[in-house]
Amino acid sequence: MALSPFASRSPSMTVASPNSALRLKAAASHHVPGQAAAAKPESKPERELTEQLNDDVRRKYIKGALEATAPQGTIEFSLRLTDRIGKKLGEGTYAIVYLGHFRDDPSSCVAIKKIKVNAEYKDGLTMDAIREVKYLQELSHRNVIALHDVFSSKDQNLNLVLEFLPGGDLEMLIKDGDIHYGVGDVKAWMGMLARGVWFCHENFVLHRDIKPNNLLIAADGEVKLADFGLARSFADPYLNMTHQVITRWYRPPELLFGAKQYSGAVDVWSMGMVFAELLLRVPLLAGMSDLDQISKICEAFGTPTEENWPGVTQLANYVADKAVPVQGRDFFLRQFPTAGPVGADLLMSMCVLDPRKRATALQVLQHKWWTTEPRPTKNEDLPRKSGTKKMGDDLARRGGETDDGPFKNAARQLDFGAMK
Amino acid sequence: MIEDDIYRTSSQFRLWSYTQSSLKSLRTTTNHIASERVRAALRRARERHLSATPSATGTPQPGSDAEDRDIECLTPEEELVLVRYYCEKTVELGDTYRPPLPTNVRATAIQYLRRFYLTNSPMTYHPKSIMACALFVATKTDNYYMSLRQFAEGIPGDTTADDVIAPEFLLMQGLRFTFDVRHPFRGLEGGVMELSAIAQGQGKPAPHLPHHTPESLKQGILSLALPPVPCTSITDRIGRAHGATRELLKSAAQMTDAYFLYTPSQIWLSAFLLADKPLAEFYLDTKLGGPLEQTTTDSPSPLQNPLYELRTKLLNVLTDCGALLQSYTPLSSDPDQMKSLKRIAKKLYHCQNPEKVNLKRDSAVPRSTPAGDAGTATSESETERLAKKRKLEMEQKQRGTQDMFGPELVAGRTKH
C-alpha cells in the first residue's frame, strides 16, 4: 500500500518545549500592523504558559494586508483585489472567512476561518465546530483540506487556519456552462476525491457530507475534501450512530431507511453520486423529500428487497411501493456512455444498494478504470473556473449562502467564493 | 509501516507525547510561571485593599519581600497529586449518571484534565471547576450526546449548567484545540479477538512468519505455561486476561503519565503482560516470532529471528510501561496519600490565584486582551469581595467545620 505524502509536522518535543514559547514571545514583541494584539504593551508578569503557546500560534499569521505588486492573472493579483474589499473571503451564519498569510512568508496564503459564537446554542462550542476541528487536526493528506493551526483571539473566538483554496469547488465547475470538460478531467477529479475518502476511512473517520460543493479546488488544481462538520469516527460494533446525515441527493438508501449502524459505504455512495453528476452535469437523483429520494433511487437502480439486500426490510424506515428490478450493467452503459464500459462498471460498484456489497474506498482505488485510457488529466491542464466574469456576482453574494436553501450545512460551508 | 506513519501525524503524538525529562521540565515551567503570577496577584489584591482602607494604622510597604515570602506555592509534584485526585473523581462522577458514562468518555475527560494541567496550574484554575467541564466536553467529542442541562442535573450538589460550561473555552485552549485522544481500549479488543480466533483454530498467521499455521497456533496457545490464576478453559483464560487488562487500562493507565510517554498499543500490551504474561508473550510471538531457541545459542548467528532486535526493544519498552502502571495505587484507598492530599489542598487554599476564581466572569465579559487574560477584567470591588469571602471561609475553616474540598462531589451517589 503506497503511502500518500504527508505534510511534515514537528512532534511535540520541540513544539511544546517551554523555551520556544518564551523565546518567541520576545521575538514577536515588536509592533506589527494588522495585529493590534501584538502591539499592546504587556504590563503584567509572565503570561500563563498555555496563553503563551496560543500567542505563539496566533502570531504566526497575519490577516489580509498584502502589499506585493503582481501582474494581472496571478494569484497575488487577485489577492490584492480581495484586500481592497476588506480581506473577508466570505461570511456565513457560522463563520467568517478571512484571507491571511504566514507572517514570515507573505506569499503563502491561508484562509482564517473565525467561528462565530452561537448565541442560540447554550451548550458551549457547537458540534459542527468540534467535529471539524477534531478531525482536521488528525487528517493530513493531499486531498483533505489542511488545518495548519487553531488559535483563540479576543472575545473567545476560535480561529481555524486553513489551507487557502482559491479554485472554487466542483459544483461551480459542473454548473458553469462555459466550461467544457472530458472524461480525463472527471477521472482526475474522481481520483483525487477517492484518495481523500480512502485516507479518511483508513483513519477510521466517516465524512458524511460528500457533495460537489464540499470538494474544493486548490490553486494547482488539486481537489480537497472539506467541511468536516458532520464527520465522526467509526463507532465501535453495536453502538448506534445517527442516520440524519449527508445532504439528501447524496444520501445512500441505508440512511434513508434509518440504519443506525453503517460504514464507509455511505461515503462511497455519495462519491458515486458525485461521479454521476460530473458525467451528467446535473444531480442524478434530486429528490424533493426523503421519501421522494427513496423512490428516485428505486426508479434508477431498482427496489431494495430481501433478495438483493438481506435484512433491508428490518430497517426502521424501510418502504417499497414499487417493485423495480435491480438495474444491470446495460443500464449504466446506456446512462453513462461518456464513462466508457470500465467507468460504468466502477460507477455501478459504487451504487450497489446493499452497503455490504458496495465497493469500499480501497476497492474504488484499485479499479482498473484509473489505468484505462484516457489517462487522468494532469492538474495543470484541468479546466478552471471562468475568470473575472462572475466575480462581481460572487462578491455580492454572502458566502455560505449556497444553493442548498434551508440545509443547515449551507451555513457551515467554508466559502472561498468571493475569490473568483 | 503505514500505521506508525499515521500515528505520527496524530495530535496525540505531535503535541502530547513526551520524554520523561521533557515532561518534567514542562511541568516545572508551568509551575514556575503560575507561582509568579499568584504572588503578583495576591500582592495587587493587598495593595488595593490597603488603598481602599486608608484608616489602617501604619503604612506597611505593599508587596514587600517579606510578605511575598509568606505565600507558599505548590510544587509541581503537589500539583500532580491534586490533578490525579480529580482524575479519580472524574471516574466517580461518570458513575453517578444513569446509565453511567461510557469508559471512553471518562478516559477522554481524564486525559483532557491531564493535558490541560501540563500548561496550566491548579493554583490558577482549581481542578474542581475544570473537571465537570472536561467531562462534558468529552461527551461532545466522543459522540455521547447529552444536553448541558441534562449533564448538569446529573452532578450531585448545586453545580449549575453555567458552572459547567464557564471554563469550556479556557479548557479547549489548554488542549490546544486538539480533541482526539487515542485510547488503548480498541487495540485490546482487537488482540482479544485475534487470540479467540487462534484458540478456535481460525488464527491468521502473520505473512512474514510462514511456518505458522492455524493449527500450530492453536497448539501453541493450548500448551502455554499456566496462567497466574487457574482457569477452566482457554476461552476462560482469554476472558480473564481481557478483564484484568481492561481494569488496568481504566485505572492505572489513566492516572499515570502512560499516555504522555507511550503509544496506545504499548500501553495495552504492557497491561496485558501484567495480566497474563505467558499469554501476552505468545501473542507477541505470533507477530514477531519467538525468542531465540535454547539449542541455537551455540550457533554464532543471533539473528535467526530477523525481528529479534525489534522484539527485545519492544519488550524493554513494555516492561518500563508495565512498571509505571504497577506503580499506581488509588489515592482514595491509601490513608497516607489522602493525608498528604489534604495538606496540599490546604496549601492550595492560600495560594489560589484570586483573579481567576470566578470563571463565569471570564466567559461573560468580553476580554480586554486576547487569549484569556480576563483576570484584569475583575473589578476592584470584586477582588475585595473575594478577599472578604476568603477571610470568612478561613475563619470557618479554622473552626474545623469545613471540608477541604467543599461538599463531597459524589456524596449523593448512593441515593441515585
Image: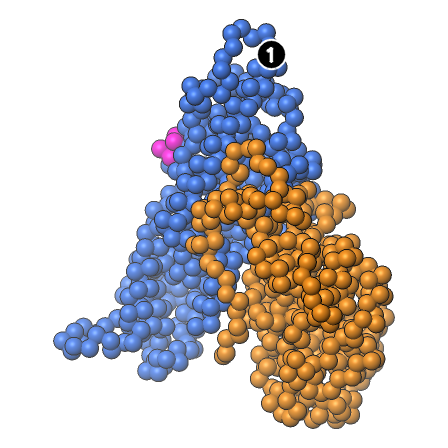
Chain colours: A orange, B blue
Establish if A223 lies above or below B228: below
Q: Residue, x 52% and y 73% (percent of image)?
A: A5
How many discs appear?
Answer: 1
Quarter of the picture containing the N terminus of chain B is bottom left
Closer to the camera in the image, B214 or A378: A378
* Left or right: A31 in relation to B42: right
Instruction: Give, as a three-letter code, the residue at label 1.
Output: Thr
* In magenta stretch: residue B21: no
Q: Which residues are magenta?
A: B336-340
Q: Quadrant of residue B409?
A: top right
Q: Position of residue A365 (x, y in %)?
A: 59, 81
Q: Residue, x 68% and y 82% (percent of image)?
A: A381
Q: Is residue A389 visible?
A: yes
Establish if B49 lies above or below B256: above
Q: Position of residue A94 (x, y in %)?
A: 74, 54
* Left or right: A294 in relation to A350: right
Q: For mark 1, name the chain.
A: B
Q: Which residue is mark 1?
A: B53
Establish if A169 lies above or below A230: below
Q: Residue, x 60% and y 12% (percent of image)?
A: B53
Q: Position of residue A187 (x, y in %)?
A: 67, 84
Q: Residue, x 62% and y 21% (percent of image)?
A: B385
* In magenta stretch: residue B339: yes
Circle 1 sits in a helix, a strand or a loop, which is it? loop
Q: Quadrant of residue A216?
A: bottom right
